[in-house]
Image (tube, grey):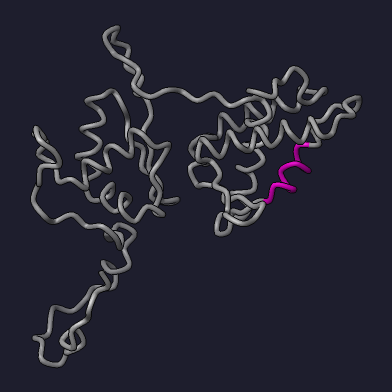
Amino acid sequence: MPEEFDDALFAEQDRPAGPALDPTEVFSEHAPSVGTHVERAREPRFDGDTSELPPEVCWALQELVAAPHVTDKSKKHWPVVLQYEQVLRSRLAELGLVLEVNREHRFAFTRQADDPSPHSRTVLRARTLSLAASALALYLYQQYLVASDDPVVSTTDMIDHMLAYKRAEDTDEAAFQKKVRTAIRSLDEASIVKEIKGTDRYLISPVITSVLTADRVEALTERYRAIAGGLAGEDDDD
């Protein structure tokens, strides 16, 4: 149901003056995000719910475990992650998971902790990128660094870039393009890129800066420099 605004919403003249605003606080990078801000008490979500956390925090916790990442595009979960970061970090640690929050690029994700105990169980399923997908991810990483304010790339650009890995004797361009599109789809499924509906373009997620650390970028770069034959041995279904 649409909201109905009361005239008193704009009646500022009759309200007592509040304390002066400190610009350093208003524009601080640590200021709370606009969006969901949890203030209400805990409510049971279902019969048998014994959690002491508000529902919004429980849902954010589920998202951190089930989804590849949470970004500031999620107006429902991102503010909750910031507000309850320490609580979420503690709950995830109980599962052997580590919460990573990147405030610069405004995203969060969980990774499996390096627990040496033989009793520790792996909760998160590792995703392995194919050779083509990892080569494409390296290209997307470079594109994101160049234009992080507008990290958009077209399918044509990605295919053209990947032609550098095409063997000279490979004359089946249709099969090669299919391989590249499979790589794009795998990156989409990993939420590293997101298709812009109605176009052939993709938005590069800032999470790529964590997926590809400096060490991984260096290792991949060296690997592809050493691959004179391009994508030889790559399986279309990888």
Q: Tell me where the magenta segment starts and ends, as one range.
A: 154-162
Asked whether 220 or 45 is in front, the reply is 45
Where does residue 167 sit, x and y in percent of width and height?
85, 26
Instruction: Count every numbered label the image shows and give the total.
Output: 0
Instruction: Give left or right: position of 234 versus 26.
Output: right
In the displayed image of the protein, which residue is found farthest to the front?
A: 1
Q: Position of residue 119 (x, y in %)?
A: 26, 9
- The secondary structure that most of the magenta stretch takes on is helix
Going 64% across and 44% down the picture, which residue do you hit? Answer: 142
Residue found at the far bottom of this picture: 13
* Horizontal and vertical percent position of residue 140: 63, 43
Quarter of the figure that contains the N terminus: bottom left
Nearer to the camera, 172 or 39: 172
Q: Is residue 15 left or right of residue 31?
A: left
Q: Quadrant of residue 29?
A: bottom left
**Is residue 158 found inside the magenta-colored segment of the image?**
yes
Which residue is rendered at x = 56% and y = 44% of the image? 193
